[in-house]
Amino acid sequence: LKAAESNPMLHTFVTVLAETGVRAYSEALQLQWPDVDLAGGFLNLRSEPGQRTKSGKARSVPLTARLKATLREHAARFRLAMYDGVRSPFVFHHPSTTRRAIAGARITSFRESFDNAAEVAKLQEAFRPHDLRHRRVMTWLADGKNPVHVKEAMGHASLATTMGYTHLLPEHLRALVEEQGGAPTEKAK
């Protein structure tokens, strides 16, 4: 996130991916302003012609406090911006016209910007936006969140897909020998 701070669109994009686990190109970059429900605290992913989720089903993903703050700041800066007298409907749009982009048009890829930020942050060369989706699933499961809720938020077709992430999380096994406060149970002593 720190490496993306100089590019507000990229910074918001990375925050959306890290905090929600939505798919980078087929979901995050399709977001339009009406899909962002700051009052209710959700990103609403529609699935309709021209804007389809992988499963083909619409879903809502809750916003963390950090993401709400980032989206409020992003909206204050870009939601009402005019480009040749027109507001962009897209959350992620080009803020200026260049030889490769038209101001207000939807951004279709952050690949180069993302890779540059990952390099500045000294992340593995193979790090990609989809890794943030995996991170979100794993952190929710490691934090003991209900796997059914995680499945719904991620748009997985089956609970088996969601639970497939648990093999990456040895931390969840600690719950077998710890009480909620972290102290060993009487039987474990």
Image: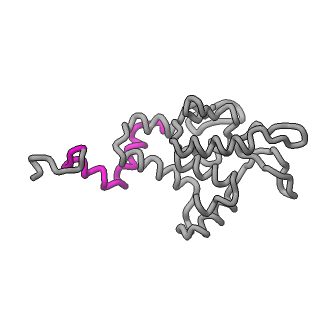
Q: Left or right of 104: which side holds 109?
A: left
Residue 111 locus on image (x, y percent): 67, 58
The question of residue 108 being in magenta is answered with no
Across and down, in percent, residue 154 comes to: 50, 40
User: Is 89 placed left or right of 152 in the picture?
Assistant: right
Q: Nearer the viewer, residue 54 or 186?
A: 186
- Considering the whole magenta stretch, tell me its main secondary structure: helix
Badge count: 0
- Taking the spot 54% from the left edge, 67% from the top edge, the residue there is 123
104 vs 5: above or below: above
Residue appearing at x 49%, y 37% in the figure: 153
**Which residue is more in the foreground, 140 or 152?**
140
Which residue is located at x 48 percent, y 51 percent? 134
- The x, y position of residue 64, in whole percent, is 51, 41
Furthest residue toward right: 84
In the image, which residues are magenta?
A: 156-180
Give the residue drawn at x 55%, y 62%: 127
Quarter of the rendering containing residue 140: top left
Position of 99 relative to 157 (above/below): below
Residue 117 in percent (x, y) is at 63, 64
- Does the magenta run of residues contain 161? yes
The quadrant in which the N terminus is found is bottom right
Q: In this figure, which colouring scheme has been used for the structure?
A: one colour
